[in-house]
Image (cartoon, helix red, strand yellow):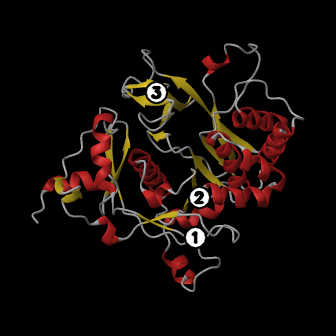
Amino acid sequence: MQRDSRLVATATLLLGGNIGFWLRGGAFVPIGSFCPCEEVFPRNVSTASRIAFDDQNLRRPNRVASGSADVALAPSHSSKSGVISSDRRSEETQNLDGIARSTSRFKSHSSSSDQSQIETRSEGERIRSTCKIPHNIFYTYKDDILKTKAPPLIYWNLMNTTHAYRTLWDEPNATVYMLTDEDCRVLVNGTEPRLVAHFDAEQKGMYKADICRVAALFEKGGYYFDIDMKVIQPIHLDADVSFSTVQEYVGSRKKKPANETANFFQSFLASEPRSEILRRALDYMLGHYNGTRSIGADYVGTRTLKDAFYDTSPEVRGRTKLLEEVRLGKSDLYPSLERPKGRGLCDFVVHDPEEKEAYFYSRGVGMGKFCRLE
């Protein structure tokens, strides 16, 4: 089967080549390839999945099977912002099959090759121990998307996010955890057992995720991303930052008192392990479900996390970083960024208002009910 140069462009962009790319400011920035993950999760979580890569998976033919016919890989088309255009995502993400594999179980103890791994680890891994927030990546969903590779747009998005942050940290072995409902239940039971019954009874997936993300980061520490949050560029947090999340769009406060602080849009959440903020958030969620704490008409996670943050003294919080969600609309804010074409809450980004840098689209087009394809 004949290869052509289009394979290189598509495979590298979709994380499938020995030289990959992540996107910043409309330009492709080359980075190194991924290596297999080796770190382990707490012993009581045996069914979590993580992303792992090897050279064989990264080398792919220039055609992939689609039904009864082969489909040639086409060159990738990027927007001015460097983000793959929404009308090509479905086609391009079909070509991700085989690029990455996920493991269904973790080892419960260190492997015998730990010493050699330590000796050959990257510069990013050598300085990792100085960071208050460990370089672990967390996603959660009812099913293991890394195993099912479905929905394909979500699968592509997780791959893209993982690629960006492993590259930023210069840590090709940074661990990725795909937490299913089963995994979340184990974590919740280990952090706040009284929440387990409420987690099981909760019918809304986003509220299950609210509980799970806080429990996971309290236990292990790291970076949590909603599965539909789309990276524009990865955010670098200084080593002494112990907590970071996002204040929700101020327009959503129109029915609240002007002096009331914005809730937290915790689609992005990073924290050190055993954070007092997260411990309070678990307590406050339990209070909500027990009927001893009122959150009004607010969403469970956004309100309880905000309250937990401000109820924790600055001295205990340590150094924190709060980003903000803003609406692009027809404003001149970040003019080089593509205005997503979708129905719903699609034109929102998460940015640093001080540094004037945008880091995420709040919701990728076609990746959820709040931002649907046109």
Q: Nearer the viewer, mark 2 or mark 3?
A: 3
Q: Secondary structure at mark 2?
A: loop
The answer for how far apart the CA atoms under marks 1 and 2 are is 9 Å
Give the left or right position of residue 301, taking residue 117 as reference.
right
Q: Where, by quadrant of the figure, is residue 100 drawn?
A: bottom left
Location of residue 29 in the rendering, given as x and y in whole percent from the top left corner: 34, 48
Number of other residues with Cα within 10 Å of mark 1, as a class: few under 14, some 14 to 19, many 20 or more: some
Q: Judge from the rendering whether residue 205 lies leftward or rightward of residue 124; answer left or right.
A: right
Tag 1 secondary structure: loop
Name the residue that disc number 3 marks.
Answer: 346
- Quadrant housing the C terminus: top left
Secondary structure state at the residue bearing disc 3 = loop
Query: Mark on residue 39?
Result: 1
Q: Position of residue 352 (x, y in %)?
A: 56, 32
- What residue is shown with label 2? 136
In the rendered image, the quadrant that contains the N terminus is bottom left
Q: CA distance from mark 2 to mark 3?
A: 27 Å
Residue 272: percent from left, percent from top: 70, 53
Q: Inspect this view and state whether residue 162 appears.
A: yes
Q: Upstream in the sequence, badge 1 or badge 3?
A: 1
Asked if the residue under mark 3 is in contact with the one under mark 1, i.e. CB atoms within 8 Å, the reply is no
| Residue 332, position as x, y percentages in the image | 42, 17
Which quadrant holds residue 64?
A: bottom left
Q: Residue at x 62, y 79 (%)?
A: 110
Which residue type does callout 2 highlight? Asn
**Of marks 1 and 2, which one's residue comes earlier in the chain?**
1
Q: Does residue 131 appear in the picture of this structure?
A: no
Write the residue at 54% across / 24% down: 326
Mark 3 is on which residue type? Cys
